Image: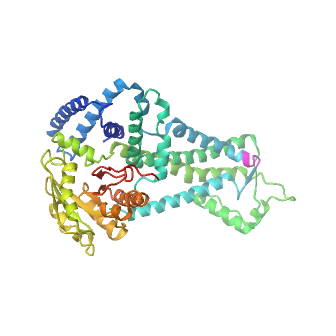
Amino acid sequence: MRATDAHTVLLVKAIEETDSAGALLSEDQRRDASRHARERADWAHDAVKARQPARGSAREQAFVLARAQRLLGDLLVRQPRLALLLQPPGLGLLLGGGLPLAALALGLFAQHVADPHHVNLVFAPALLVLAINLFVYLLLAGRAVLAVARTGKPKPPTSPRLQRLGRWLAPQPMRGSRGLPPLLLNAWLRHQAEWLQLSGPALAARLAALLHTCAAMLALGLIVSLYVGGLFLEYRVGWESTFLGAEEVRALLAALQWPFGWLTGWAPPTVDQVAALRFDATTPPSVAQGAHWVHLYAALLLAFVVLPRLLLAALAHAQRRHRERRVKLDLHAPYFTQLLTAEGLGLSGGRAVQVACLPCSLSPSPALATALPAWAEARFGQGSTLSLLPGADLALPPRQALAPLAAVASQPGQACVLLCSLATTPEPTPHGALLAALQRLDPQARVLLEASAYVERLGAQAGAQRLREREHLWREFCQRHELRCELICLQPVAAGVFDSPLWPAATAPEARP
């Protein structure tokens, strides 16, 4: 699904979840939107059925998108100012166009601010830019090696820093909040939190493209500055240093000339020639070789900064477009599950779902065993059933530990659930390896955290902070492995303690930090 379409779907999802009383969207509007979307989804499905095979959840995505567009259109009629908040976060004109221009201007004036008449061979702005970019290339190469090493492993979740940047770039509610009801603003803020987590990879690629472009523009500004300055100024070439002598400077200059020596025939300077270029009180600065060193520094910047950075920017732009065209919505979230099941478009086409639940490091209590089928029916639709499998043996390799789930994962109408205890601290081994194997076995599988025992041990109010920290740790583990995380808690728990979906809903008063 495209990013703009996913943005619309998640906004309507947040509005419906916030507007449970139907103040913004009535039940009649929601039913009418579902009927309209079902017709469009059926028509689109029939139109492509003869041309290509069905593609997983394409029909379901068409349904939720058409329904969201219909509901959003109805809402815009009543709240036209909502259109000011509908654009997905981007870099905007200030960052997207202003920063590269600022980098170009900085490059144009850097040489003249440093020393407009002299070219210091060991401390020129061009050498500083070149050194910084070579260091950045080493970092990028290290990241590429780590990415290859992580092939087949889960991707890390969107970093908190990137999410903060996305919130700063997003349209601010105050810009168009006049005339909007508080309920709608709350829904929009809720939507932004979910959207930034989903669109983080595309935003990271967009930011990388911007940084590469700025680096290229800075180097290009330096090149233009060197040549334009040479038209009106006489560069005096030399060097000075407290710690370096003529031999060390000669080695540095020879290394700088090496990439182009075979092509241009430039010979490295001798030690005596370098010593003669030193700035001091008795020897005037040399002007004979000014053009030579200007050409050399410009060629180095062009070959090792401008061209590579523009190539990296183009690759980042391509990666960003690819990610924005392929945003993955979790149609197994409770909101989508209930919506699709009601229309017979869910996990098993409207039939009851058979849920296979594999306990991990816990033995379900009788109360939990009784509550699990009710949870499955609430999450997967009416008529769904749940069967408890023998517990996973973590002493075995992950694939063998998940063997009971593997036997049913490929069957139609089956859903896989790994039942873990919130009281257990997740570790890379064995929990991380087990989640990675579960994601490979069934990308739509869920991790269900049993929180009752941990809540009872800590106390729903007194232990709210520790409960939240442990839930965040498990949620990060699941996000790294692209698995959905939910909680089931039979003890009273304060509202707002958990960020992951909780069943049954919190009934205790909201915890105070």
Q: Is residue 422 left or right of residue 163?
A: left
Give the extent of the magenta segment: 113-117
User: Which residue corresponds to the image point at 34% horizontal and 24% vertical from the top-left?
Assistant: 77
Task: Give the image quarter of residue 371.
Answer: bottom left
Q: Is residue 415 visible?
A: no
* Position of residue 473 measured from the top left corner of the image (x, y, whole percent): 39, 60
Residue at the extreme top of the image, as rendered: 77
Residue at the extreme bottom of the image, as rendered: 395
* Position of residue 357 measured from the top left corner of the image (x, y, whole percent): 20, 61
Task: Give the image quarter of residue 455.
Answer: bottom left
* Position of residue 61 measured from the top left corner of the image (x, y, whole percent): 25, 41
Q: Main secondary structure of the magenta part?
A: loop
Quadrant occupied by the N terminus: top left
Q: Nearer the viewer, residue 316 or 177?
A: 177
Q: Is residue 216 visible?
A: yes
Q: Where is 37 relative to 442, above or below?
A: above
Number of on-image labels: 0
Q: Is residue 74 left or right of residue 243?
A: left
State yes or no: residue 325 in magenta.
Answer: no
Q: Where is 358 relative to 511, above or below?
A: below
Residue at the extreme right of the image, as rendered: 282
* Position of residue 467 measured from the top left corner of the image (x, y, whole percent): 39, 59
Q: Nearer the viewer, residue 435 or 318?
A: 435
User: Which residue corresponds to the image point at 32% horizontal and 50% vertical from the top-left?
Assistant: 506
Q: Is residue 277 left or right of residue 86?
A: right
User: Which residue corresponds to the image point at 27% horizontal and 64% vertical from the top-left?
Assistant: 437
